[in-house]
Amino acid sequence: MKLSDFDFDLPEDLIATRPAVPRTSARLLVADGAAITDARVSDLPSWLRPGDRLVLNDTKVIPARLSGMRARDSGQGPVSAKIEATLLAPRADGQWTALLKPLRKVKPGEVIRFAEDFAAELTAVEEGQAVLRFSTGGEAFAAALERVGAMPLPPYIAARRAADAQDRDDYQSVFARHDGAVAAPTASLHFDADLLARLAAMGVGFSHVTLHVGAGTFLPVKVEDVTTHRMHAEWGRVGETAANEIRETKAAGGRVIPVGTTALRLIETAARGGEIAPWEGETDIFIYPGFRFRATDALMTNFHLPKSTLMMLVSALMGQDRVRAIYDHAVREKYRFFSYGDASLLIPGD
């Protein structure tokens, strides 16, 4: 299975840099077995049935992109350098791993100041990533991030424009609860309170799980034999309530439909024993064609990057030839791609 099997031509003008407004006005490609239908996210109730269950990732994106200054004395006097930091993940010791740009401008022991009362010391560099110890923690740390941080937009958006105040709302789902993600579970961004209420009224259930999406979701696959690719790990939790709801839905003949690949990866991790059960920890599950799905019946997801692990995941669910046809249709009909783009509802055939 080669990396080139998951490639396709994507015109740059189809990469969305802003979301649809309102959220539910985004387009929705419905691939139901062999059929493809062009719809809107607001039409989702037409495609779901009473007794179906949506699995929602309730992680909350933190404003993880920081801009600061490093100062030091030199033979020519005080010198400073602008440093950009993107937080990646908290460590058990209270420090954070982060990407620093430029990393070479900072030495271990030096301090980067992001605000008068908010700074971090570089304590180590490990595998090209910085380890930072912040001057404050707990609620004060979270408050400082909210005050001085920016939303960590995906690289393909950040290369075109800077994050702004609108992204604080746009890049966060309406059901986000638990701080910890540095990238959004982007299929979740299409929902608003009205759509959730309409689905609930027709008998669709919701189960909340948490997977803190990391920046590793944007890492390219560098091996030609995709089966040798090593996935990044992300922390997640499927609680007892969610596991029971999913089991009961399947037993009653309803469909379990994760909203986003992150929710899918998490429930499939929790179901590796054969049936879904409560689970908590770090998952590095890698889903590619040949994978046996134990919890998932269909998937709502955005359109993904060529040659990405997410293209491999949707190909595992729908079949490689089917996904090629779906993406050919999406490009031809000018669907908007990636994090702020349009959505698809993928329902495998028999």
Image (spheres, rainbow, N blue to C red):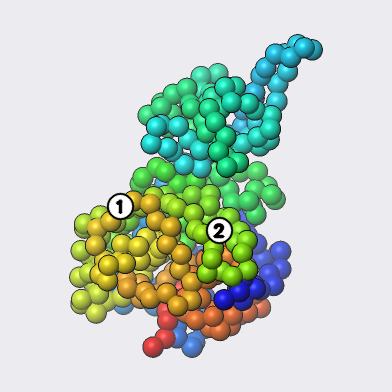
Dot 2 falls on a residue whose secondary structure is loop
Q: Is residue 281 visible?
A: yes
In the foreground, 241 or 93 = 93
Left or right position of 255 against 181:
left
In the foreground, 296 or 144 = 296
Q: Which residue is mark 2?
A: 339
Q: Quadrant of the N terminus?
A: bottom right
Q: Is residue 164 visible?
A: no
In the foreground, 8 or 140 = 8
Dot 1 falls on a residue whose secondary structure is strand
- The answer to whether residue 233 is above or below residue 337 is above
- The answer to whether residue 67 is above or below residue 35 is above
Task: Residue at the far right: name it.
Answer: 76
In the foreground, 212 or 75 = 75
Q: Position of residue 70 (x, y in %)?
A: 64, 23
For residue 225, the mark is: none
Q: Residue at x 38, y 52 (%)?
A: 282
Q: Position of residue 276 (x, y in %)?
A: 26, 66
